[in-house]
Amino acid sequence: MNILDKIIADKRKEVALKKTIVPVSQLENTALFERETISLADALRSSKTGIIAEHKRRSPSKSVINQDLNVQDVASGYEDAGVSGMSVLTDGKYFGGSLEDLLFARASVKMPILRKEFIIDEYQLLEAKAYGADVILLIAAVLEKAQIKQLSEFAKNLKLDVLLEVHNEEELQKSIMPSLDMLGVNNRNLKTFEVSTDISKELSKKIPEDFVKVSESGISSVEAIKDLKNYGYQGFLIGENFMKTDDPGKSAKEFIRQLAQ
Ligand SMILES: O=C(O)c1ccccc1NCC(=O)[C@H](O)[C@H](O)COP(=O)(O)O
């Protein structure tokens, strides 16, 4: 069993339990459920930096990254730095995140927010909307084609943007469909945890032009971004590189200053 299989097995139990505690009607009756969402895909199309900065306390590959910060400060710092959007990990067991993190980030910033979660059920999309997300992530490695279609169409009906993540060509080919907004290539091999942007470069020519291309994970230099831009990437998801510092917003600001040079 690889790490993704373990996370998904736990997620199935978690979602089943949550459904017994918080009914759908309660999610649908929150104030944020009526909020007009902001498109991350549009922000990336019109942005110079394209950076999606992540709130990430810990991870299976790195253990603890930073547990000392509060999410409101991180979110405000990222917005002040001029990132195009923010990603908030909401998984508790493996990443130390929560839906409350998403709620606090939403209350702190106006920019588009991605709920970074292991989505397997429509219920989690209702949660995403109720807690203030604008975007959801679907991971092709853990979903059948029919599930990708069902979940992405459900998300679009909720006016949420959809970022579909792939790790290889097979996952890409099964996933291409009109209900997606962005196609993300994850540079982290989830079996070995090795990171290499080569996979983003390799898959770039196979991603149809209609989708915004996002390169995810293991990005720590402006040179890597300049290189990936040559392959058509407009979005760059960065977590650890900012979160390992005392002030992720300041670190993102300096990164963006160097990118502009
Ligand atoms: O980060 C991990 O170790 C990880 C392990 C298993 C599944 C997902 C994982 N990460 C989620 C992400 O997609 C990253 O947090 C995101 O792309 C940012 O990556 P990084 O810039 O390398 O922190």
Image: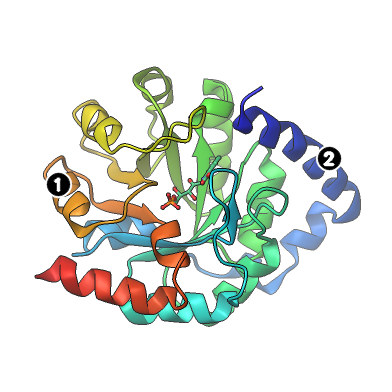
Question: Which of the pair 254/49 is nearer the observer?
Answer: 254
Write down the quadrant of residue 32 in the picture: bottom right
Looking at the image, the residue that sits furthest to the top is 170
Estimate how packed mark 1 is, as few (under 14), some (14 to 19) or many (20 or more) residues with alpha carbons within 10 Å.
Answer: few
- Counting from the top left corner in percent of width and height, residue 78 is at 40, 74
Horizontal arrangement in the rendering, residue 3 relative to residue 238 (left or right): right
Q: Secondary structure at mark 2?
A: helix
Which residue is at a point 56% across and 79% down the rendered structure image? 72
Secondary structure of residue under mark 1: helix
Seen at 21% across and 53% down, the residue is 225
Pick the quarter of the image with the C terminus: bottom left
Q: Position of residue 257 (x, y in %)?
A: 19, 75
Q: Is residue 207 visible?
A: no
User: What amino acid does circle 2 point to?
Assistant: Ala
Say the numbered circle drawn on residue 146: none
Q: Are marks 2 and 1 in contact (CB under 8 Å)?
A: no
Q: Height in image: 137 above or below 36?
A: above
- Disc 1 residue: CB within 8 Å of ligand 1: no
- In the picture of the structure, the residue carrying the numbered disc 2 is 16
CA–CA distance in space, label 2 to label 1: 43 Å
Residue 30 locus on image (x, y percent): 72, 69
The answer to which image quadrant residue 53 occupies is: bottom left
Under mark 1, the amino acid is Asp
State the residue position of label 1.
227
Nearest to N terminus: mark 2 or mark 1: 2
Left or right: where 123 falls relative to 84: right
| 134 vs 71: above or below | above
Mark 2 or 1: in front is 1
List x then y, in percent, for residue 8.
68, 33
The crowd level at tag 2 (other Cα within 10 Å; few <14, some 14-19, many 20+) is: few
